[in-house]
Amino acid sequence: MKILHELQNPWRTESQRLVYENSWIRLREDQVIRPDGKAGIYSVIETRLATGVVPLTDTDEVYLVGQYRYPTNCYSWEIPEGGAEPGESPLDAIQRELREETGITADSWQELGARIQVSNCFSSEEAQLFLARKLSLGTALPDGTERLEVRVVPLKLCLKMISEGEITDALSIIGIYRAQELLRSRS
């Protein structure tokens, strides 16, 4: 079911200026006319497409990746995630990330719903989530910015970790819930 809306975009962009850019993000500052008719600025962070995967075993266990996250200054348990390179498809990107972070390859892939707007109040970042099944184990090849732990956790325990605040990463929470819903709808 799709809920329709009747509103037109109330924002008007007068100009755009690139403030900062590196390999991962672009910061743009737009001169806008706000919905109340007054002039203002709106800063937008642009990023590459993010991808995430719930690697699920035949016994409904999830491979989680644990790592220290610099921006939040805390340790985080997450599903394998990463950004798509320019010109790389979402599926190719997450297959690469899964292999790099865990050493896992999978024979069965399914998108977990529509793309997610990660933080649409200040970023244009979107993410595509996948479910991976029929897993084969290999050797992880993390990049130099990653020191990772990999754990196999029952899906039911992942849900408990979410409710108890042990899994706080947004893509992981959405991916795990979407995977659970998909499995429930099949049974």
Image (cartoon, grey):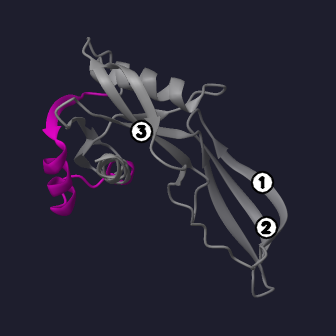
Mark 2 surroundings within 10 Å by alpha-carbon count, few (fewer than 14), some (14 through 19), many (20 or more): some
Q: Amino acid at mark 3?
A: Gly
Q: Residue furthest front?
A: 187
- Whether residue 95 sits left or right of residue 138 in the image: it is right
**Residue located 30% across and 46% down the image:** 183
Q: Residue placed at 33% from the left, 44% from the top?
A: 70
Q: Are marks 1 and 2 in contact (CB under 8 Å)?
A: yes
Q: Is residue 156 magenta?
A: yes
Q: Is residue 55 left or right of residue 17?
A: left
Q: Measure the alpha-carbon separation of dots 1 and 3.
A: 31 Å
Q: Earlier in the sequence, mark 1 or mark 3?
A: 1
Above or below for 82 versus 97: below
Residue 29: % across, % down: 71, 59
Give whichever of discs 2 and 3 has the lower sequence position: 2
- Say which element carries label 3: strand
Q: Earlier in the sequence, mark 1 or mark 2?
A: 1
Q: Secondary structure at mark 1?
A: strand
Q: Nearer the viewer, mark 2 or mark 3?
A: 3
Q: Nearer the viewer, mark 1 or mark 3?
A: 3
Q: Which mark is residue 31?
A: 2
Give the residue number, with chain letter if any, for mark 3: 52
Instruction: Give the camera-side residue of 101 and 53.
Output: 53
Does residue 66 appear in this view? yes
Q: Magenta part of the protein: which range?
A: 146-173
